[in-house]
Amino acid sequence: MSTLVDEIRSYVVTDFLDGEDTSDLTPEFDLIASGVVDSLGLVRIVSHLSSTYAIPVDDIPLKPEHFRSIAAMAAFVESARPAVV
């Protein structure tokens, strides 16, 4: 899952923290409580995860705990994306 964590971290850094210090951005860093991601940011994240990992938007429950951290997003993607056959 570390590749997935790295991919999601890269997205968060590029789209939400461009130019900011990211040294504290661990996989468990709380993106919502810290203010990095707000409600509109959650919509952007859902759209990104849906298109990047082939997760139908209708299948994505909008629960903050799934998007609170990079690790939570990676775990959610692992459980929600279609199995490769």
Image (cartoon, helix red, strand yellow):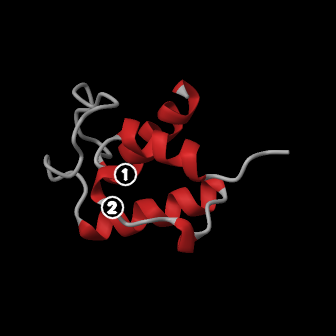
Q: Residues within 10 Å of mark 1 (few under 14, many from 20)?
A: some
| The N terminus - image quarter | top right
In the rendered view, tell whether residue 72 sits above or below residue 81.
above
Task: Using residue 39 as the reference point, say whether residue 33 is left or right of it.
Answer: left
Q: Nearer the viewer, residue 4 or 65?
A: 65
Give the CA distance from mark 2 to mark 1: 6 Å
The amino acid marked with disc number 2 is: Lys
Task: Using residue 49 as the reference point, say whether residue 56 is left or right of it.
Answer: right
Q: Nearer the viewer, residue 11 or 49?
A: 49
| The C terminus - image quarter | top right
Residue 11, given in percent of the width and then of the height, sits at 46, 46
Mark 2–mark 1 contact, CB under 8 Å?
Answer: yes
Q: Quadrant of residue 63?
A: bottom left
At 70% from the left edge and 53% from the top edge, which residue is drawn? 82
What kind of element bears circle 1? helix
Q: Nearer the viewer, residue 14 or 72?
A: 72
Residue 74, given in percent of the width and then of the height, sits at 48, 40
The amino acid marked with disc number 1 is: His
At 53% from the left edge and 38% from the top edge, which residue is drawn? 7
Residue matched to label 2: 63
Q: Quadrant of residue 27?
A: top left
Q: Residues within 10 Å of mark 2 (few under 14, many from 20)?
A: few
Task: Using residue 27 as the reference point, say whether residue 11 is left or right of it.
Answer: right
Q: Quadrant of residue 57?
A: bottom right
Q: Residue 66 — which label?
A: 1
Residue 55, given in percent of the width and then of the height, sits at 61, 61
